[in-house]
Image: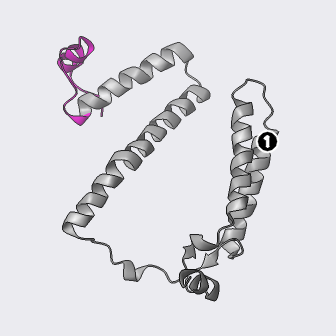
Amino acid sequence: MPYINPFLREKIDNNEFKPVIPGTFAYQITKIINQYLEENGHSYSSYSAIIGVLESVKLELYRRLVAPYEDKKKEENGDVFNTQSYPEKQISTAGINIEKLKDIYRGLNLAYDKLEYLGGSFQPFYDGMIKLAEFIKELERGEGAIEKGSKENEKFNNK
């Protein structure tokens, strides 16, 4: 939590102390958030932007640093998960229609470009999201992918 004592706050504010514990690190992040709110005001949009940025940074940190570190440790020390106990019905990526994914991506990319401008059309974004939702429903019904253990998946894996 960022609720560190006033002495440490002053030292950090004067750049006399580096964040070496989670509380001082959280305090520095909170200072940046407060600056953002001073510039942009307290609103749902500001809160949403802050949470979105924090979540994106968290996910990127995990993807780039934590996951590779954990993979290295798994190789060094052995796996701890019993992969034999996974549910029987798993979806293989072998049967996913790549062209559909590319079409969805193009639609969302177009939406992103349009949303960069205030007042841009939200329709391409909406259309892309509808296509994505339909494809997810197909995957859930087993129509857009091949289930593990199916004859189609066995044919693919034996090639």
Q: Name the residue under label 1.
A: 124
Is 4 situated above or below 67? Answer: above
Magenta residue check for 14: yes
Q: Give the range drawn in magenta.
A: 1-22
Taking the spot 33% from the left edge, 78% from the top edge, the residue there is 82
Residue 1 or 133: which is nearer the viewer? Answer: 133
Q: Position of residue 16 (x, y in %)?
A: 18, 14
* Quadrant the C terminus occupies: bottom right
* Residue drawn 38% across the image and 43% down it: 61
Residue in the foreground of this view, choosing between 7 and 11: 11
Toward the bottom, the furthest residue is 151
* Occupied quadrant, residue 54: top left
Colour scheme employed for the rendering of this structure: one colour
Along the viewing direction, whichever of 50 and 68 lies nearer the viewer: 68
Residue drawn 29% across the image and 57% down it? 70
Q: On screen, 50 above or below 61?
A: above
Q: Left or right of 88: which side holds 79? A: left
Please indicate whether residue 158 sits to the left or right of residue 19 in the image. right
Outermost residue to the top: 14
Q: Residue 2 lies in magenta, yes or no?
A: yes
Seen in the picture, residue 53 relative to 158 is either above or below; the reply is above
- Amino acid type shown at disc 1: Pro
> Residue 56: percent from the left, percent from the top?
48, 40
* Residue at screen point 23% across, 26% down: 4
Mark 1 surroundings: few (<14), some (14-19) or many (≥20) residues within 10 A: many
| Label 1 residue SS | helix
- Is 89 placed left or right of 62 in the picture? right
Residue 111 picture quarter: top right
Give the total of numbered labels. Answer: 1
Q: Residue 50 at what x, y percent from top left? A: 50, 30
Q: Quadrant of the N terminus?
A: top left
From the top left corner, tell me how far across and down residue 123 is, in percent. 82, 40
